[in-house]
Image (cartoon, rainbow, N blue to C red):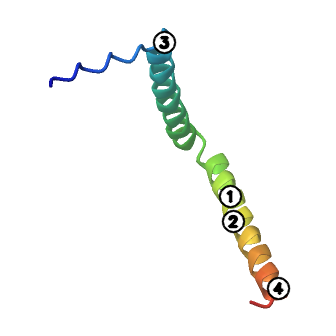
């Protein structure tokens, strides 16, 4: 017997627009970061230094926690 093809899924209006907006906003964010890095290298260096300091602090806290629970 032949089976009938499943009906095509209805796409809600606006779904395509949401996907396109997400891509546009992502690319705008990337462009802004590149612009910021190019026009304000001192500020960018401060941001990177702060992010690395935060990661170092998080790593130290994790190590301290693991040492205290005595794995």
Circle on res. 12? 3
**Residue 8 sits in quarter:** top left
Q: For the residues carrying marks 3 and 2, which lies nearer the camera in this image?
A: 3
**Residue nearest the observer in this picture, 15 or 34:** 15
Q: Earlier in the sequence, mark 3 or mark 1?
A: 3
Number of labels in the image equals 4
Q: Are marks 2 and 1 in contact (CB under 8 Å)?
A: yes
Instruction: Name above or below for residue 28 compared with residue 69.
Output: above
Tell me where residue 13 appears, x and y as whole percent.
48, 8
Distance, label 1 to label 4, CA atoms, is 27 Å
Structural crowding at the residue carrying mark 4, measured as other residues with C-alpha within 10 Å and reported as few (<14), some (14–19) or many (≥20) = few
> In the rendered image, which residue does mark 4 sit on?
69
Distance, label 4 to label 3, CA atoms, is 51 Å
Q: Are marks 4 and 3 in contact (CB under 8 Å)?
A: no
Q: Secondary structure at mark 2?
A: helix
**Residue nearest the observer in this picture, 70 or 28:** 70
> In the rendered image, which residue does mark 2 sit on?
55
Q: For the residues carrying marks 1 and 4, which lies nearer the camera in this image?
A: 4
Q: Secondary structure at mark 4?
A: loop
9 left or right of 39? left
Circle on res. 51? 1
Instruction: Name above or below for residue 35 compared with residue 50.
Output: above
Residue located at (81% from left, 79% from top): 65
**Residue 40 sits in quarter:** top right
């Amino acid at each position: 017997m032949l089976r009938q093809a499943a009906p095509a899924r209805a796409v809600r209006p606006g779904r395509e627009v949401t996907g396109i907006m997400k891509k546009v906003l992502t690319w705008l964010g990337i462009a802004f970061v590149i612009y910021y890095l190019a026009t304000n290298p001192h500020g960018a260096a401060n941001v990177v230094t702060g992010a690395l300091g935060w990661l170092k602090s998080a790593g130290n806290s994790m190590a301290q926690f693991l040492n205290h629970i005595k794995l």
